[in-house]
Amino acid sequence: MEQKPTKEQAQKLMKIKGEVRGVTFKTDIEYILREKGEGGLKEVEQALEKLGVNLKYKDIKTMDFYPVGLRVLSLLVIKDVFNFSNDKIKEMGLFATKVSLIIKLFTRYFLSLQRVFFKEAPRIWKKHWTVGTLLPVELNEKEQYAIIRLKNFNLHPIYCHYLGGYFCGVLQLIIKSTQITSEETKCSFLGDEYHEYLIKWK
Amino acid sequence: MEIKDDKKEENFAVLLEDLASLETYARDLFTFLPLPVCLVSSIGIILEVNPAFEKISGYKIEEIIGQSVDSILDQAGLKELSEETFKKGFVEAKEIDILRQDKKKIPVRTSTILRKTEKGEIIGYFIAFFDLTDIKKKERELQDAQIALLNMLDDTAKGREMAEAAKNETLTIISNFADGLLVFNRESKLSLINPKAIECFKAEAKKIIGKSVSELGQIPVFRPLTNILGADLTKVFRKEITLRENLVLEVTILPLLEKKEKIGTLVIVHDITREKLIEKMKTEFVSLAAHQLRTPLSAIKWTLKMLLDGDLGEITKEQKGFIEKTYQSNERIISLINDLLDVTRIEEGRYIYNPQPFQIEKVVQSVIDFYQEEIKKKKLKFEFKKPKKKLPKVKIDAEKMKLVIQNLLDNAIRYTSLGGEVTVSLKDIKKGIEFQIHDTGVGIPKDQQERVFTKFFRAANAIRMDTEGSGLGLYIAKNIIEAHDGKIWFESQEEEGTTFYFTIPIKEEFTEFLKTF
């Protein structure tokens, strides 16, 4: 059983350096509205308020930058309020790729798998985050797998699940397959130097 | 010139604001667009859909984005669509089916347009769908209605063919009918005449078709017919007309009814020339035979009379009895011969009437007086009712009228049992005189009443009661009454009695004539 987010934790998270684009909050809003409706969104805002954070989701601007700590806290509160499992968090990551404005803007560059994987994926990351570096490691179209690495991104383990879904979602837009899976093979929270994901498809 | 940091920040905020507005605008446009739209990548992956697409496909956005476009389009349709799009850059209004999530096929009109980068690299293509479900439904309904209409037209054509066949059949029957047929339409104009009628009237069909009764009346050969047709073509049953010396026709006029509405008139002319000739020959034979028989019968009568009167010497009582019976039988034969002669005269039109103004009660009284003896003998309760006021004179042939009353009274007495009732009445009915004779006799059986006025007819119960009687009395009576323009009829109930009636009209000119006295 995971611990409920606390005021202290919130304050600590808010002190983490780095920023993230408002679009990541927007995709969360879409997900909550679809799953829980307007009431659900209000519940999350109220829970954040109890932690001393006054966040109005609908005021968030897609292209503006927000503290990365706020993003982590928002995700933790959502997980807590709705008692979401890690798989549900992964699903939120997958869902984000379907409705993200930045992803939509990037589709104009989705010309080939090679280009997206090696060129556009790091750019997409940079468009979202001022922290962490995305490194494409290997793309084997024959064997149908890809390895991607994420360095200097040690915000919170909840993001390990979220990003697993997110990477799957991006690949769904460039690979014609109904079975795409991702697995975090290395994790900086488990003593590794970086996060590494193995993405497979059939 | 360098922009200060705070100014940069301000510009950045404005840009973000504009970007947010642009995003909202693009989102609203895409969301409220009623036309289902999706963006497909160059390898056939659905990258973006709008809510209208969600609705038509049955998929949620998160379910369909990232899926192959194959999931909504069949291979053949997709191949054709993408090939044409990549080749031409667009597709306009192509009709295909899309497969919804619930596996239901929806007919759509599809348009596509390629999406390229600034460098001309193909990113994919947009597809817009226009739902044709309602239009197709309407089309199907229209087609069904068209088929139904064609079926109806077919049925109508068949119906018309059948009606045509039935009409031809009817015309064939009419054409080959042994009787002459003339059909007059609603406007009483001749609309059809068959060959037999043309033969009778010796007329050309094309010259008389469309003529009214009065126009036909101007053609001499049609005049005997138009005289009985009248202007309103009233119903007539078996009326004889003589067209020429050797052509006698029997005319029947019937209304042609369709659901009780008169749509025309049918005139049937039946050639009875041959029947009339045979009848005439028969009448002539009967007349000749009767005349030939009457002379010797008269001689027998007078000889028997002389014997009975003792002019030829004394005869015994027994001999007298035999001779009396012979005399009575001879009388009956003479009476029958006289009746037969009357009938032949009637049929030959030689039954001469000599109408004179006459007080009819006198004729009635004289007949009653003659039958007084018989009435007493049968102990009948007899009554003669006549109005207190003197009846007007009527123009009658007194001798013939006497014969009528005699026949009726004779029948009443003859067929009424001992002690029964016979009542004779005379009434002034303004336009004429009505004679009535009522008896409490055997009556006439219902099933034989129609034949009462025909020649030689005698009811079964009458024959059982009395073997005598020629069956000519009522036939003669009817002819005499009708020759006076009167009517004769009866009411009868078997075992209860009979009432005979006849009327003699007082004609206008005769009334005027009487006033001069």
Image (cartoon, rainbow, N blue to C red):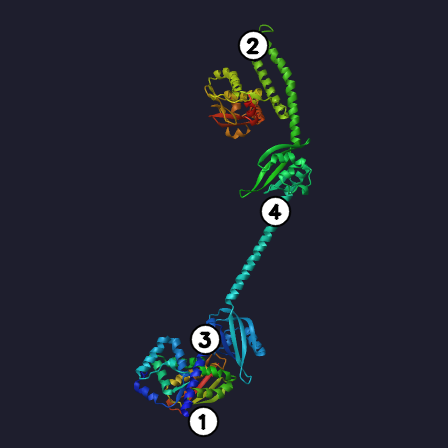
Which tag is nearer the camera, tag 4 or tag 2?
4
Image height of B266 relative to B450, above or below: below
Looking at the image, tell me whether mark 1 or mark 2 is earlier in sequence order: 1
Q: Residue at x 56, y 55 (%)?
A: B152
Q: Report which residue position mark 2 lands on.
A: B320
Which tag is nearer the camera, tag 4 or tag 1?
1
Q: Chain of mark 4?
A: B
Looking at the image, tell me whether mark 3 or mark 1 is earlier in sequence order: 1
Q: Residue at x 60, y 52 (%)?
A: B158
Q: Residue at x 65, y 18 (%)?
A: B292
Q: Are callouts 4 and 2 both on one chain? A: yes
Which tag is nearer the camera, tag 3 or tag 2?
3
Which tag is nearer the camera, tag 3 or tag 4?
3
Whether residue A96 is visible to the viewer of this picture, yes or no, is: yes
Return the mark for residue B31.
3
Comparing B450 with B342, the one in front is: B342
Looking at the image, tell me whether mark 3 or mark 2 is earlier in sequence order: 3
Q: Amino acid at mark 4?
A: Ala
Q: Give the CA separation, mark 4 to mark 2.
A: 78 Å
